[in-house]
Amino acid sequence: MEDDDDNTFKILVATDNHIGYLETDPIRGQDSFNTFEEILKIANREQVDFVLLGGDLFHHNRPSRNCIHQTMKLMRQYCFGERENKVWIASDQSVNFNNGFYTANYLDPNLNISLPIFSIHGNHDDPSGVGNLSALNVLSMAGMVNYFGQSQSIQDVLVQPILMQKGTSKVALYGLGNIREERLHRQWRSGRVKLMRPQGPQDESQEDWRDCFNMFVFHQNRARHGPTSSIPEEFLDGFLDLVVWGHEHECRIIPEEYESFAITQPGSSVATSLSAGEAEPKHVGLLTINGSDYSLEKIKLSTIRPFQFTTVVLSRVEELSPSDVKGTHKYLEDVVDDLIRRAKEEWEEEHQQLSDDMPTPLVRVRVDYSGGYDTFNPQQFGQKFVNRVANPSDILKFQRDRGTTSRQPRASEMLKDPTMAIPEQLDLVRVEDLAHELLTDLYVLPEPGLKDTISALVDKDDKDVLRRFIEDCTKEANTKSRTFHLYP
């Protein structure tokens, strides 16, 4: 058994940790930190070779000092130590890790790393601003994370693998951090995204890496919201064996076979949107690889805050009528009470051997008010459940049946909708959609570039991006005016 362990990779797989989400919230502020600590504890308990993260380690592009401090404290506590690691990297590490030191942290003689973490970036913690850096660059420079998968070109995306060997088993680990969906879709469709396969040996003294286990981790939309707003499975190379798909928050961690490869979607480790997919149990995966064979065991996370979700169609409730507003209000209160009771029962069933009290649960009721029913203020409704649920201000989400809706509401209309809570508005409304709707007939400032610039200013807190964009556009406009003699 010991010999078999020497030839078997053990990898803990997780994605979308969103550390720092709602960190100032008095109830939910520590949720993301608690669960990330649990993930590191599981990795140490299982004695894995390394942790593989699929993007969005941080929720904010520029995490707060408190967030960075707590994250580094956890990594120092659980990832530093003397435990020997038997994984050898055969590829050129100066290509894999562009951090100036050009080596994985656990192979650096100046560091004692017992639990290596390999991570790509997601759409929340992607590089931006001066130097095109992300929070992962900071952790990489501190020797705490092996940050890989950052494309050096926006035109041609060449993904070089990290070639790893443990005993007789070989793994080629490909990684690609998040790239704006529409751009990456076009690049992939035009053949400008290439996963570079290892070349054959030049002589008998070199290892042959063409026959190894090929794994790809990336962070993009899997659900198809539009013709170019996702990456179809058929774009992926057929030589791959396993794809770790980040970004999607629903946990579908059991590998799903697709033609010649399988896809595992671990999902998020903290609920950032109160949707049906987020209400499913959350897991991380213990991946073992021996030669060309692999298995993935799902491990349920126990620090997840209880979350109950249901949908109510008011027109289908016999005792209700559109004119009975008080009756509707009372009925929904009973629904919430029932969900709180259900959360408590499930918690007690799953934690029978523990004396821990149940954390205040999250509750979301999606209310279909088609058929003449009126909405009411969700914040006022939630006042009754303060201290009983973790999200009293946005328990209810009103919506009409899609079959009765003539069109998708504009971004500005959603912001003015009194039935939507502020966190929900911020989840659904993108600043680039507002720019597209409100800023039209632009001549000097091109609309696509302006949308990206406003997104970087708001989402990434890049305070200098607007100045750089305006300077570049005015220079280009002046050049064109001189060329074509538009002005005297």
Image (cartoon, rainbow, N blue to C red):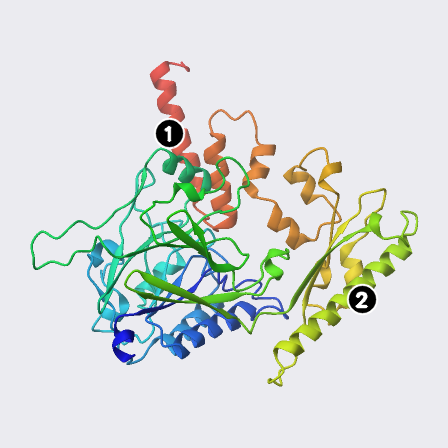
Disc 2 marks a residue whose amino acid type is: Lys
Residue placed under numbered mark 2 in the picture:
384
The reply, left or right, for residue 220 in relation to residue 139 is right
Pick the residue in front: 115 or 21.
Answer: 115
Res. 344 in view:
yes
In what quadrant of the picture does the N terminus appear? bottom left
Query: What mark, if any, has residue 475 been given in the picture?
Result: 1
Residue 100 point in image, percent of width and height: 23, 59
Residue 233 point in image, percent of width and height: 43, 44
Q: CA distance from mark 2 to mark 1?
A: 58 Å
In what quadrant of the picture does the C terminus appear? top left
Q: Residue 50's image quarter?
A: bottom left
Pick the residue in front: 135 or 91.
Answer: 91
The residue at the point 64 percent across, 70 percent down is 27
10 Å crowding of disc 2: few (<14), some (14-19), many (20+): few
**Rendered position, 304 above or below 355:** above
Residue 304 point in image, percent of width and height: 57, 70
Disc 1 marks a residue whose amino acid type is: Lys
Are the residues tagged 2 and 1 within 8 Å (C-beta)? Answer: no
Q: Which structural element holds mark 1?
A: helix
Q: Residue 231's image quarter?
A: top left
Q: Which structural element holds mark 2?
A: helix
The residue at the point 39 percent across, 73 percent down is 75
**Rendered position, 270 above or below 243:** below
**Rendered position, 451 above or below 391:** above
